Every structure is written in C-alpha cells, then in structure tokens.
Amino acid sequence: MSAVYREYKVEADDFTRAGEASADIKRTLKQLGVSSTVLRRVAVACYEVEINLVIHSDGGTLTLKVDDEGVHLKSQDVGPGIADIDQAMREGYSTADEEARSLGFGAGMGLPNMKRNADRFAIKSRLGEGTTIDMMFALA
Amino acid sequence: MSEMKRFHSVRLDKKLCKGCTNCLMHCPTEAIRVHDGRAHIIDERCIDCGECIRVCDYHAKIVETDPLESIRSFKYSIALPAPSLYAQFRNLKDIGYVLAGLKKIGFDDVFEVARAADIVSCAIRDKLRDPTLPRPLISSACPTVVRLIQVRFPDLIPNIVDIRQPMEVAADIARTEFCKKNGCSPEEVGVFFITPCPAKMTAIRSPIGQKKSCVDGAISMMEIYRVLRPHVAKMQNEEGLQSRSTHYGIGWAASNGESRVVCPDDSLSVDGIHNCIRVLEEIENDKFGDLVFFEGNACVGGCVGGPLVYENNYVAKNNIRKLVSAAKAKKNEDPAQAVPVSMMNKYDLYMDEEIRPNPVMKLDEDMHAAMEKMERMNKIIEGLPGYDCGSCGSPTCRAFAEDIVRGYFTENACIHKMREQLKIMAQRMVDLAQISSYEEKKE
C-alpha cells in the first residue's frame, strides 16, 4: 500500500515561521488530488495544530501521512503538557499568553476546531512530558 | 466552456523572447518554462495576471485583444468603458467628455460599466445579508483572482459570490436598451469592453460561471486612449454626455472601491497577485474568523494598475480619487437610491454555471500514481542544489523535480548537477591518462 509521509519541526514561539508547515501540507494534498472539501477541513485543523505548537508547546513535530484511508495528522510536543484536557477542549478556554493574544491568537477555539473538522480526533497529554494529538480525515 | 481547450490572452512574441528567466521567476502559478531558447506558456496554468508582461525587458509578452476596427463588423457598436478609463486623463473636468469622445471615435452608443457596478454592488449587499452563505464571501470581479482560486485554492470556490462581473451586466443592459430604443435586433449590435487587462479578454472568450458572455469583444485601453485623447482634450462643456453612475460605481476602478460600497467595515481589499495569494492562504486556514468580505485585485492599485493602461497606476488611483470626490460633491447618492428595483429584477445578475476547480497542480488523476510521483519527486529534490536559479528552465528546484516526474525534463537539464558530473568525469579522465602513461613507460 502506498503512502506519503512528511515531517515538520515546529519551534516554540517562532511566529515568523508559523504557518509554513501548514502551507506545505496544503500544497502536498493539492498535488495528490485530495478533494476540496477534505482539503478545507485539513487546512483549518493543521493550521490550528501548528499554531498550538508555536504558542503552547516547548517545540515539537507535525507529521503528515496520506494513505488509502485518509489524511493523518499527528502533533507531538516535548512539553509542558495539559493539566486538564476536558477544560482545554472547551470552546473559549485558552491559556495563551499576552504575546500570543496580541498577535490575534488564543481565542480558545483551537482544539474544538480541530475536533470539529477531523473525522477522528484523539488527544493524550501528561503534565511535564508533552501532548500528542492524532487526527484523521477520511478521503471519501 | 470548461471542456473546451483553455483560452488565455497573454501570448509570447517568439522573435522578441531572449529566453531569460525574468517571467519564469515571477509567474504566480508556475505557468512558464524556458527551453529551446525561449519561454513557453503552459496554457492550462495561465491565469492572465499579466505579471510576465510587466517584468519582460524585451516586451516579448503581448496581449491578444480585439482591434478597434473590429467594431465595424457589426451594424451598430456600443462601448463599455471600464471606470479605469476615466483615470487615464489628468484633470478630467467631466466624465461625460470621455463618454462623448467614445462616440466621436466610432461607437454608436456608450454604457458605463461603473453604472453596472452600482447594480452589482446592490446585488452583493443582498448576498451579504444571507447568513447561510460562507464567510468571507469572495468578490468575483477580478477574473484573475477567480482563476487563481480555481488553480491554487479550489477549496475556496464555494466562497466566491455568484454574481456576474459588472462588465457582463453592463453588456446585457446596454444591448437590450439599445435594441429597444432603435428597433434593431441583438445580432446587429456589437458590444465592446474597453479593457485594462488581458483577464477580461479571457473572461469574454471563455467565461467563468457563465455559459456565454454578453460581450462581443475587448479593446485594449491603451489603443483606445491613443485615439480618444485628442477628442477629450478638445471637448467643451456643452458637448459632454452625462455620467449616470454614482461615485461608488466610479470608485470600483481602484482597489477597495468594491469593498467601500458593499461591506466597508468587515472587509479586506488586497491588491497585487502575490499579496492575494498570501491572504488567500490565510483565509484557507480560517485565520480571519470575523471577516465578511474579501476583495482581491490581481493588479497593484486595482484595475487602474492593469497591464493595458496608459497612466502610472498611482497617478491613476489619485485621478479616480478626485473623480469620486467630484461626483460625490455633485450628487452624494448610494447605489440603492440610484438603481431602480425594476432594473435589479429585469436583468440576470447571477452566474448560471458552477465554478469548477482547475486542478493543474495534481500530479496524477490516480491518487496512488500521484503518491508514487511525489515520492520520486522528493528523492529528486534531495539531490538538487536548491538555488532556484531557473537555468534548467523551471522556476524552482521543486518545480523542476515536478517537471521531471511529469516527464517534461530530464535531470541533466540541471547545470549544477551537470557540473558535478563533469568534475567526476574529468577526474576519471585524469586517472585514465595516468594509467595509460604508466602502461607506456612499462613498454
């Protein structure tokens, strides 16, 4: 079974490069011929997850895999982890700092937006260790 | 129309092209390749933005428009001046001079596209009142931006407002009114748009969102200006016709002109094709949650910056600003007051065909094949220098790798790779020469 993999390093607090991984992911999906409706949902979710890595994490990686089932996005960071996932998943809840808010981020819609757009969404986190988010977008 | 071979209006003058890489490097859809000593335009990718025309030092990029004489192939002819035409004249006292001048150079009638812009403005406002439509709604006025979305942002097609361009609405009204007034049949009347850009020409030959264009041809603004200028310069007060558009309609000539009337508070107006790409990329990411309307103009300054205009775009933008204030001082009218409801109902303001994606970026129709090509492409990219020098004839190393997997080029076209290989070959020849001289000595 053929599949396409991509991995992107995302640095913490690097706002100048935020969005570059998403742009490359979108281009990859367009070249593969992923349908516009799926593309639109992936675009929103992958930008949110990338921005989350920049704002909240101590850095991490974003992985893209496209196979027969669909588009898989995985975000893995090295910390600091989420204390209360239920609270973090609530719309409007954000722990973004002043700098991020001054740049227009931190509306507390990131995680809920990812969940809404993905066909499968899973989040695991351990305080002091890091967070992993798995998303899948079905092709058909 | 989309099944037809894609038509575009930007052409290459083979004799003038030197085969440099200027146009190659500036094309926003990577639609140009240089080989056999000259540029080649990939028809399916060209969106008629005119960037290559602007950057070509040898004037080898030309636009195919209709000559002024073509109006004679009809019994009657009507001119549709884009409001950017008014901006070509410094200190224009009255827009009516331009309208009267058009009749002097051979047209039987004139209908202002700015007036149609007033009608279109009302129709877009109606659309914006519909909360079920996606946000932001994207303007359909600039055909290049619409084509850009078809090629690079197909997922934003549902956001494009499905209202015809002012040019189309103008043509429909102008022909209908003229036939009624003069008792002639529609086929006897040729309706010609005075165009600032190649994209409008293309929009007539292969319309987007419309089965057939109401416009019969497009004449370059530059050509019209040359003939029209002496007439306008001589014009006296009494000779002028009356402009019937509002100051809002006139304002459509420059960037923000449309937003200013349809959604002044929650809109973005972006000009320049590369800026449009940057912002559309962010709209695709849903970065502007509260944005209601997006107006993109491929040319810097809006239509006044088109590749077929005479005047410098900044001067032209200022000219428009002055004409807008003058019109406003004369009659400060909103399109809602100026456009009768009967007119809104009488003419077809909406697109009658779906806008479809133009997936030229797709590597293969079959996704598995596309995946294989992509993997091959990435292996090739790893071996390329990443200078994006254009010497191979593709705009970037990445595009070059794509061209190889598509079967257009071979890896040998990269001069840097070639140099590496030559180095190895040269070393081998030295080695070989040493071995043979040793053999000779032995003998």
Image: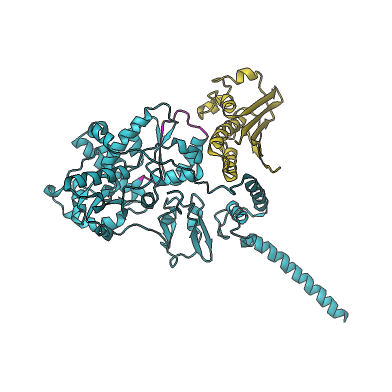
Residue drawn where x is 18% and y is 50% of the image: B100
- Residue B296 magenta-highlighted: yes
Residue drawn where x is 37% and y is 30% of the image: B128
Q: Horizontal placement of B217 versus A59: left or right?
A: left
Residue B223 shows in the view: yes
- Letter of the chain in cyan: B
- Residue B57 magenta-highlighted: no
Secondary structure mostly seen in the magenta stretch: loop
The quarter of the image holding the C terminus of chain B is bottom right
Q: Nearer the viewer, residue B222 or A5?
A: A5
In percent of width and height, residue B377 lies at 64, 51
Extreme residue in the bottom direction: B443
Magenta residues span: B285-302
Q: Nearer the viewer, residue A89 or A100?
A: A89
Colour chain A is painted in = yellow
Q: Nearer the viewer, residue B80 or A106?
A: B80
B20 is higher (above) or lower (below) than B276: below
Q: Horizontal placement of B68 versus B294: left or right?
A: left
